[in-house]
Image (cartoon, grey):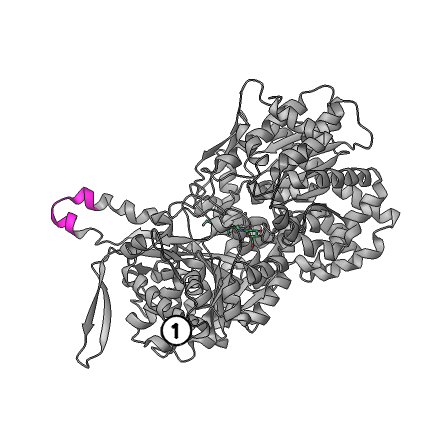
């Protein structure tokens, strides 16, 4: 407890008997008016949407915190085991619609707002997305904590309260422009600051070894520059079950004594200004997914998260148990979301040994019984490594501990494989040669009792490839947990029309038991049901078409097939392959070869890491191709192409209900899982995809006949690499040749000579890691089949229904049950 907020008076117990808040229309209306008129002091003047939105948010928030307190009480009274989801990213999106839905207030709020002359849906659209994540990994964390609350699992999220989230993207002359996302500018009504749980974090300085009177050695980390971590709590409501878990996000602040030296030297302003350095830590989310860049500030962020969260949990433990840690490992579990919070392995050792006087072996037992690691990528460029010299300068004591962990680990390896120097070097936590680096994935595996991948293929590849040595040493640590998404946000909230149709057909249980969707199977070929299904899809397509018109000025015909690829822009995801197909269609239409071509509206969306030049070139290419295609009268409405700017969670809520065809076209073996693929499937889109990530499991569930498969398998990709010759493939394929000729002839960059040379050089190179050209023919053929299937509306609708009906596996409710049964082993606790 921070001294600033120490209890100074004996509280009147009556204070804790807060009267229960009403859940009826009248109570909501009254509270809304009170927030609007009193708390926000609004009067007759202009009714700014901001105040209206805030009044409703505060009204709902009260009801969330009321339940959060009860949930916390239930956990502490039952003394249950708890798990902590540690993640540098929580891509929450908007909170209001989800809060109303999970509180069971959707209808009541809608009515109450009508009474006040307001529109609930309009109010929800005023909310700024909480974009505290890059993509899949961050959104997964958000879906996970939603499911944990719904399953009544005692799980807390720990993350960083970035002042600036994922950058805002706009498009100028076809190029991506970035601007800062100051999402907190208008305040965040969903958060509660808890300064009493402030933690102190050390950086820099050095270590000293001292002997105490008893002759025992102790280590002291001294002369450090400390900063403060102040927690902000966000309520995470379960679905209509009274449980509200919490997401605790840390903000960095300067300590008051920060730079006391400057202060004493008379540099008052400099001393105050140096607060900035401390506050920088939680200032901005790093916008790179899948490429580590070794920046010092990023390591500071990681340590800040790990240390603040672990101290918080230890303090809580000590409040209840004193300095007795005997049961700590039975009662606590940490799930590390990729290697980003992995410095926590060494930090927990440090806290237990240096701050709580524990010996190495006992501390190590606790660490290795409580830490579990999830890997989210096989791409070597995404595996985090930190230069040892930087690590040591920033976190001297933590580096010493890592060295000791490594020494003990390597002697275990040497016992198993005597004399195998090469293996020792490849498994070491410290990478030698050139500049020494700390390999965070190795630290995570050594320090954890569980290591999992995020889809069956991915987990298999981890064991066979990347982490094979570790798998040989500890086969039992390794397991798979196929990802999912929460159907509360990704169906019930974002697709109300489908929700109504599904619920009136099979009941409402699917909202908490997604396997129930199987019950739709018998309706797949019913004419009456198909008609209703198509009406829903049509209405959702109209909603998306409006958004496209408004943001891109392009008209989408809702009779056309909506063909959609939205995700981060990355070469391995092969937006380029999709563009080549678009150019192919354009070429055919121009030549009058339109047999079997279905009307298509192709939509792209996604952000490129600001430093990733090739990804930015791909955005430019999409826009240039779109420009040519959309303005060619010969093409007309046969083909439309747009790049929708600023793709984010709230945009996906409009996009996925409207999709007909879901593009999941990564090079096999490269996409760990994918989760957008699951959102599309749930909402009745049919996938065109490779045998990669969770696509494999999607196809297994949906059946081959409801999935458009193409491309090399992971094995084949690796074989084809040898002697790969894209130019030879191009020369032999007339369609492909014409596409490449158009590109090389500058057809899409008439006034920008050589603009796409880098792209052309990349996909025609013998060394193209993504093998785009190798999959072209097979992709074009699959696209053709998809087009034919779409023309047979009855067949297509049946496929669409079957995709939704078989999407049950891809609920994070299932994923969380598996994490819990096989890793966390928590008991479910419901509040009174
Ligand atoms: C060091 C920078 C950095 C940042 C983020 C490296 C790597 C990442 C993540 C691992 C990138 C990511 O979001 N991975 C995605 O995780 C999803 C959830 O498991 C998977 O569905 C995606 O396939 C995977 O790309």
Residue found at x 87% / y 50%: 526
Up-down relation of residue 78 to residue 739 (above or below): below
Question: Magenta-highlighted stretch: main secondary structure?
Answer: helix
Q: Is residue 828 left or right of residue 497?
A: left
Could you tell me if residue 316 is visible in this image?
no
Q: Residues within 10 Å of mark 1 (few under 14, many from 20)?
A: many
| The one of 114 and 292 positioned closer to us in this rendering | 292
Q: Position of residue 454 (x, y in %)?
A: 58, 58
Q: Position of residue 416 (x, y in %)?
A: 46, 74
Kindly identify the residue that appears in the image at 64 percent across and 46 percent down.
Answer: 720
Which quarter of the rendered picture does the C terminus lie within?
bottom right
Query: Can residue 696 be spotted in the picture?
Result: yes
- Asked if residue 269 is among those painted magenta in the image, a careful observer would answer yes
Disc 1 residue: CB within 8 Å of ligand 1: no
- Please tell me whether residue 167 belongs to the stretch shown in magenta: no
Identify the element where label 1 is drawn.
helix
User: Residue lying farthest left?
Assistant: 265
In the image, 681: left or right of 46? right
Residue 126 appears left or right of 515: left
Over which residues does the magenta segment extend?
261-271
**Residue bearing the label numbered 1:** 364
């Amino acid at each position: 407890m921070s001294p600033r907020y120490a209890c100074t008076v004996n509280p009147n117990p009556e204070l804790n008997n807060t009267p229960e808040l009403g859940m009826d229309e009248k109570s909501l209306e009254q509270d809304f008016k009170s927030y609007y008129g009193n708390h926000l002091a609004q009067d007759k003047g202009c009714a700014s949407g901001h105040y209206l939105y805030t009044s409703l948010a505060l009204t709902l928030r009260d009801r969330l915190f009321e339940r959060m307190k009860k949930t916390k009480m239930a956990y502490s009274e039952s003394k249950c085991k708890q798990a902590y989801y540690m993640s540098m990213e929580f891509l929450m999106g908007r909170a209001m619609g989800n809060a109303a839905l999970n509180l069971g207030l959707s209808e009541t709020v809608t009515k109450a707002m009508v009474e006040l002359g307001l529109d609930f849906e309009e109010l929800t659209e005023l909310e700024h997305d909480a974009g505290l994540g890059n993509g899949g990994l961050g959104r997964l964390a958000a879906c996970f904590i939603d499911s944990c609350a719904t399953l009544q699992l005692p799980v807390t999220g720990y993350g960083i309260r970035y002042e600036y989230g994922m950058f805002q993207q706009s498009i100028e002359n076809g190029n991506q422009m970035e601007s800062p996302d100051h999402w907190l500018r208008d305040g965040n009504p969903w958060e509660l600051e808890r300064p009493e749980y402030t933690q102190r974090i050390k950086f820099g300085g050095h270590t000293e070894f001292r002997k105490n009177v008893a002759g025992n050695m102790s280590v002291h980390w001294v002369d450090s520059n400390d900063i403060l971590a102040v927690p902000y709590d966000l309520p995470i409501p379960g679905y209509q079950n009274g449980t509200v878990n919490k997401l605790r996000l840390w903000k960095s602040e300067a300590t008051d004594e920060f730079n006391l030296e400057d202060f004493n030297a008379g540099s008052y302003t400099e001393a105050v200004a140096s607060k900035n350095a401390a506050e920088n830590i939680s200032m901005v989310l790093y916008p790179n997914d899948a490429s580590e860049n070794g920046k010092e500030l990023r390591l500071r962020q990681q340590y800040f998260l790990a240390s603040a969260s672990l101290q918080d949990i230890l303090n809580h433990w000590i409040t209840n148990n004193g300095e007795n840690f005997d049961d700590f490992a039975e009662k606590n579990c940490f799930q590390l979301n990729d290697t980003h919070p992995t410095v926590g392995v060494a930090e927990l050792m440090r806290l237990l040994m240096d701050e709580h006087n524990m010996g190495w072996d006992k501390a190590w037992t606790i660490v290795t019984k409580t830490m579990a690691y999830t890997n989210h990528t096989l791409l070597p460029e995404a595996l985090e490594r930190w230069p040892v010299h930087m690590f040591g300068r920033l976190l001297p004591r933590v580096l010493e501990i890592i060295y000791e962990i490594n020494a003990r680990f390597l002697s275990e390896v040497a016992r198993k494989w005597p004399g195998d120097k090469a293996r020792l070097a490849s498994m070491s936590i410290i990478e030698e040669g050139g500049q020494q680096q700390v390999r965070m994935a190795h630290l995570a595996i050594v320090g954890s009792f569980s290591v999992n991948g995020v889809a069956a293929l991915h987990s298999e590849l981890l064991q066979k490839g990347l982490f094979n040595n570790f798998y040989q040493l500890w086969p039992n640590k390794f397991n798979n947990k196929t990802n999912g998404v929460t159907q509360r946000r990704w169906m019930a909230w974002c697709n109300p029309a489908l929700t109504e149709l599904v619920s009136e057909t099979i009941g409402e249980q699917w909202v908490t038991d997604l396997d129930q969707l199987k019950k739709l199977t018998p309706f797949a070929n019913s004419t009456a049901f198909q008609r209703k299904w198509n009406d829903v899809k049509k209405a959702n397509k109209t909603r998306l078409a409006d958004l496209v018109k408004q943001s891109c000025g392009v008209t989408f015909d809702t009779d056309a097939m909506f063909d959609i690829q939205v995700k981060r822009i990355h070469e391995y995801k092969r937006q380029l392959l999709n563009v080549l197909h678009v150019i192919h269609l354009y070429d055919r239409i121009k030549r009058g070869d339109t047999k079997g071509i279905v009307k298509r509206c192709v939509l792209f969306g996604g952000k490129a890491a600001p430093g990733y030049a090739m990804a930015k070139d791909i955005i430019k290419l999409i826009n240039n191709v779109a420009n040519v295609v959309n303005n060619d009268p010969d093409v007309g409405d046969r083909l439309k192409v747009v790049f929708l700017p600023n793709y984010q969670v709230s945009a996906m809520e409009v996009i996925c209900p409207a999709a007909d065809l879901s593009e999941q076209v990564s090079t096999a073996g490269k996409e760990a899982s994918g989760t957008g693929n699951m959102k599309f499937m749930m909402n009745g889109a049919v996938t065109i995809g490779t045998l990669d990530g969770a696509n494999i499991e999607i196809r297994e569930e949906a059946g081959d006949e409801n999935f458009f498969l193409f491309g090399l398998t992971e094995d084949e990709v690796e074989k084809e690499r040898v002697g790969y010759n894209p130019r030879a493939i191009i020369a032999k394929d007339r369609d492909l040749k014409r596409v490449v000729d158009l590109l090389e002839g500058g057809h899409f960059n008439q006034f920008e000579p050589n603009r796409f040379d880098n792209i052309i050089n990349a996909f025609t190179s013998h060394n193209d890691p993504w093998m785009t050209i190798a999959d072209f023919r097979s992709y074009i053929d699959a696209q053709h089949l998809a087009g034919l299937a779409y023309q047979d509306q009855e067949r297509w609708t049946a496929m669409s229904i079957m995709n939704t009906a078989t999407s049950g596996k891809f609920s994070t409710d299932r994923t969380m049950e598996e994490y819990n049964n096989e890793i966390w082993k928590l008991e479910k606790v419901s509040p009174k």
